[in-house]
Image: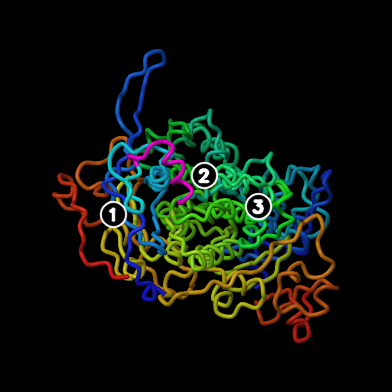
Amino acid sequence: MIETKKTTETLLKVENLKKYFPIKKGIAVQRYVGDLKAVDGVSFEIRRGETLGLVGESGCGKSTIGRVILRLLEPSKGKVIFEGKVLNQLSHEEMRQMRSQMQMIFQDSYASLNPRMRVGDIIAEPILIQGVSSRAEREKQVCKILEVVGLSPYHGARYPHEFSGGQRQRIGIARALALNPKLIICDEPVSALDLSIQAQLINLLEDLQKEYHLTYLFIAHDLSVVKHISNCVAVMYLGKIAELANSEELYKNPQHPYTIALLSAIPVPDPTAKKDRIILKGDVPSPVNPPSGCRFHTRCSKVQTICKEQDPNYRELEMIIS
Amino acid sequence: MDQELLLRVKELRTYFYTDAGDIKAVDGVNLEIQIGETLGVVGESGSGKSVTAMSIMRLIPIPPGKIVSGEVMFNGKDLLKASEDELMRIRGNDIAMIFQDPMTSLNPVLTVGDQIMEAIMLHQKAGRTEAKKKAVEMLKRVAIPEAEVRIDNYPHQFSGGMRQRVMIVMALSCNPKLLIANEPTTALDVTIQAQILDLMNDLKREYGAAIMLITHDLGIVAELCQKVLVMYAGNTVEYTDVVSLFTKPMHPYTWGLLGSLPKLDVWAKQHLEPIQGQPPDLRNLPQGCNFAQRCNHKKLICEQQKPTWLENEPGHFVSCFLYEEEGKRHD
């Protein structure tokens, strides 16, 4: 499936992106005491029609990246380039128009759908904001989108609480699709769902990608789901990308000790499989005060003296062929 | 065979009577756990896994809940008929439980040490000093660094993985014969999950407790369990040893679960085959098999009658009309 797509055009490029959250202390007078380095120098690109998987443990900065790309959060440093335009330089109005090209699907479909709005209105709202003023036209579009995501037009008249988790996530997808976006940022879209429902939605996302030539940034912590859906995978640890490779390559031949440990930690649903598991000791260090040198050195099994002193360069070992 | 039997649940039914209707959360559960064995209980949300565990411990809030019928034989005693005093002695002592969310199951205003010591002092009639010594020892055993200091910390000073270790310590402090672990690693990251699973495996060998592991992760089942029970909409649909479940699953629901699983070791592009539709409303269960409306193999009878729980092959139980002719009745 990878070979058939010969478009090498880059849709989204992220260059040395950083997002620091200032930490303040004091009740009356707030003083600045340091930074939480949520994202600390991340670069990657996604080609049109492909999926980049972003994996990592909680707190590694994967969701922050998604938000910074859409400028829901302003980056502290670095650039986000979408179709050749540097997003951080756009004015508020230009960015608003640009957002019709890039949409987001959230993990928690309870929290991301307004409980007081009918599903039809939720999906119609982005269409309205982007300037389709005829009600009949909007309703026509909503019906079409509902069918695309596997719901029926009559569902539009209901409220979010009348749906199951899987159906609500379909509504979230429908809302993201309403404006025919080019890029969809999926932030843990299936993590909260049961296995059989999860598989339905993964298939739906894949079908939609083929049909509408969508590009996904797929953020998740489940490595098997990410492998299934992604062309390339980036593994994050404490605000940095530890390893980025073609999906098959990453899983067959992981290079970074963190990736190796992470892959070995996944329980394999095969009782006869042989496991030599690498158990990482301790917890992930705090991003407020990350370890010196390589951030992984405190838990790495192959740690050397240099690891504690110098931050390793992020460089290309082999060309990514996909 | 029978003297090794630790727990047998037969035709357990637990209903909840609510204003919105009667919810048949557990509606015919059968299972067996031998001494020292690990049983994995898998199923989707709302399939009745947790209610089964709570019913075994008799922790169902009454009302609205009620254990309608069934039998829970633990060590030769029917827990459903036991008095509250007898239950007090069994809970914590013989059967212990670990919950999914270690933040809400630890008391935030008591130190970790106090909570571990409470269990030891209550069940083993130990004094404070002795209990503290044992608590430190146990914390060291589960690899909490600086256990002597950390024992006086509060739960919020612990990370998620460490809190779950504390829960494990509390559960194991009285050497239970059966440990019920309800989604013990679901809230944890995969590297921390690996630590906890590894620890549970070690402790199981050391203490010899049987474990009833409730999970929705088939990977964890494959790695940790000897037997597996698959639940769907309050019923047990399949029970067998772990290898048979993965190599020759019998129930169409199990087929569907395995087909929904994205695999890490398959290199060719895999096409997932999900189960269509969604689980039935527990207030309004179908007349026939609960799985019939989503089943690709349904026959006419599936929509009219409930299938029986049959031992289709030795040790392999399934409740499905596909096997009803060949099988023998099990009761």
Q: Tag 3: Cα neighbours inside 10 Å, few (<14), some, or many (≥20)?
A: few
Q: Position of residue A212 (x, y in %)?
A: 50, 64
What crowding class fits label 1: few (fewer than 14 Cα within 10 Å), some (14-19), or many (20 or more)? Answer: many
Decide which of B157, A109 is in the foreground and name it. Answer: A109
State which chain disc 2 sits on.
B
Picture coordinates of residue B167 (x, y %)? 52, 44
Single out the residue that lies furthest toward the bottom.
B326
Q: In the rendering, at what x and y percent does residue A210 appear? A: 49, 68
Q: What secondary structure predominates along the stretch shown in magenta?
A: helix
Between B130 and A242, the one lying in front of the other is: A242
Callouts 2 and 3 close, C-beta under 8 Å: no
Residue type indicated by callout 1 = Ala
The x and y percentages for residue B4 are 63, 67
Left or right relative to A103: residue B65: right
What mark, if any, has residue B282 been given in the picture?
Answer: none
* Residue in the image at 40% along x and 50% along y: A57
* Same chain shared by disc 2 and disc 1: no
Labels 2 and 3 positioned on one and the same chain: no
- Pick the quarter of the image with the C terminus of chain B: bottom right
Q: Callout 1: residue from which chain?
A: A
Give the secondary structure at mark 1.
Answer: strand
Region rendered in magenta = A88-101
Marks 2/1: CA distance?
33 Å
Coloring applied to the structure: rainbow
Q: Is residue B34 left or right of residue B224?
A: right
Tag 2 residue: B167
Amino acid, disc 3: Glu
Residue named by callout 1: A242
The quarter holding residue B211 reads: bottom right
Report which residue position mark 3 lands on: A137
Question: SS class of the residue under badge 3?
Answer: helix
> Under tag 2, what secondary structure?
helix
